Amino acid sequence: KMSIEYDNYINEHKELVAKAFYWLEDNVPEIFKNKEISSIGELERQICDRHDYSKKFVDEYEPYDNYFYGKDKSYKSVNDFNKAWLIHIHRNPHHWQYWVLLNDDPNEKQLVIDMPYNYIIEMICDWWSFSWKNGDLYEIFDWYEQHKNIILREHTKHMVDYILHMINSTLDYKGYS
């Protein structure tokens, strides 16, 4: 089953993620001067073309569509959505959860792995897309402050904080508000 509403959401989300990327490229080019980025063109394709590609796969699409746009809020619908979300984050390394390894060894507990820089940028574009949708480009900073449950390795957190600081400073400098 396909839904116009969910298709429109996916397309709009991808457009806003791309809009965030292009704004960063135009306004904060220094964040792209990182030795981990071998090609801006490849990063652009990753973020602007392939972002959330798996949301069109049946095992993600149908549970998401039903959960957000269907009328069924049964236990099964919620459980199917949660399973689809878990599948989605394990297919898409721009989600911080992808980099948290839950070990079954009681002495190891969880292991947090540094995110590659290109996925950090994609994650931030993903988060920031909702600020673009709501017309408040500063909204991301409050959102990030409220989501201290996000588990990032120290270097990854430093990079996220650096990029967010650069965005905030540039917004201030350019007079957004």
Image (spheres, rainbow, N blue to C red):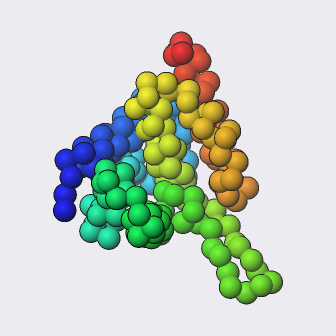
Front position in the image: 17 or 130: 130
Quarter occupied by residue 19: top left
Position of residue 35 measured from the top left corner of the image (x, y, whole percent): 55, 52
Work out whether 124 lies above or below 141: below
Position of residue 63 measured from the top left corner of the image (x, y, whole percent): 34, 64
Q: Give the quarter of the figure containing the C terminus.
A: top right
135 horizontally vs 49: left or right: right
Front position in the image: 93 or 133: 133
- Residue at 59% across, 18% down: 172
- Residue at 45% across, 45% down: 126
26 horizontally vs 14: left or right: right
Total numbered labels: 0
Q: Which residue lies furthest to the right in this view?
A: 107
Residue 65 in view in this figure = yes
Position of residue 73 measured from the top left corner of the image (x, y, whole percent): 40, 58
Q: Give the quarter of the figure containing the N terminus.
A: bottom left
Position of residue 71 measured from the top left corner of the image (x, y, whole percent): 32, 53
Q: Which residue lies furthest to the top in this view?
A: 175
Front position in the image: 88 or 18: 88
Front position in the image: 152 or 83: 83
- Residue at 60% across, 38% down: 143
Residue 41 in view in this figure = no
- Residue at 50% across, 49% down: 123
70 horizontally vs 172: left or right: left
